[in-house]
Amino acid sequence: MTTVGLLYPGHAAEDDFPRMEVMLDSDIRVPLFHTDIDEDARRAGNLREAGTPERLAAGVEELRMAGAESLVWACSGASFAYGWDGAHEQAAELARTAGLPASSTSVAFVHALRELGASRVAVAASYSEDVAALFAGFLEAGGVEVAATRGGGIISASEAAAADVELVKELAVAGDHPDAEVVLIPDNALHTAAHVPELEELVGKPVLTANQVAVWEGLRLTDRRVWAPTLGTLFATREPPPGAAERKGIEVRE
């Protein structure tokens, strides 16, 4: 069994993660601890406050007791709001506190792009334009070319969590750009886990979503590879083992 521990702020789209456990159909578990937030609004100051070391440390022991082999801070905004260097220091501090390999959703996006061999993206964010621009700046600091950035104007996590798949599709299509190799949807409060292949078919290219890359990153930190195309191109970048076309969530041994 492989166990990826997730830290998640408040309550929004956390039911994406047990859904992904089922979709992986394997011995993978993703226990989750809810961290505190002061405000539901995703503004730069609020996001930085949500990602302080004290808030992240609160759930570490519980996730260690759950057998976590890696930890991921499953909140894009409360990591990229610190900038490139700050987000990496945040992850490093979490790793020191936990004594486990650790990362965040924002850092995971860059690692996932490298996995796909892509460097030019479109940001289709649900956030306000200024917060979406912070994410674009984070990506550019990591060597990613951002062909287009679009904010959807959704300020609160609760509003994002209530969005249906049609709104997520609208975000993806409106935020895409012809020059982009991949579309990024960087909001852990959006329900996206069940819709990634549908989104990819809609825009005709790989789509990376926040909850998808958070789980992928946690598995990457444990050196675990799983072939699960129901979770999109990111989970299908390795050749499937014989007979896997009839199955899902098949581990790929390196």
Image (cartoon, helix red, strand yellow):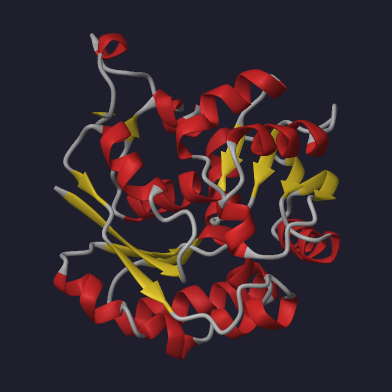
| Vertical comparison of 180 with 123: above or below | above
Residue at 31% over, 10% down: 245
The quarter of the image holding the C terminus is top left
Q: Nearer the viewer, residue 88 or 34?
A: 34
Tell me if residue 194 comes above or below residue 68 in the rendering: above
Which residue, as the protein is rendered here, is positioned at the far bottom? 54
Q: Is residue 77 shown left or right of residue 153?
A: left
What percent of the width, then of the height, locates residue 237? Answer: 46, 27
Image quadrant where residue 249 sits:
top left
> Taking 47 as reference, is 118 above or below it?
above
| Viewer-proximal residue among 15 and 58 | 15
Question: Residue 98: image x %, image y %?
Answer: 30, 79
Q: Residue at x 23, y 62 (%)?
A: 69
Give the percent coordinates (x, y) of residue 242.
24, 10
Can the viewer see residue 254? no
Query: Viewer-proximal residue, 170 or 73?
Result: 170
Residue at 55% from the left image edge and 50% from the top image edge: 210
Left or right of 33: which side holds 182? right
| Residue 175 percent coordinates (x, y) | 80, 39
In terms of image quadrants, where is residue 66? bottom left
Q: Which quadrant of the structure image shows residue 207?
A: top right
Total residue callouts: 0
Q: Can residue 109 be seen at all in this image of the molecule?
A: yes
Q: Classify residue 157 as left or right of residue 20.
A: right
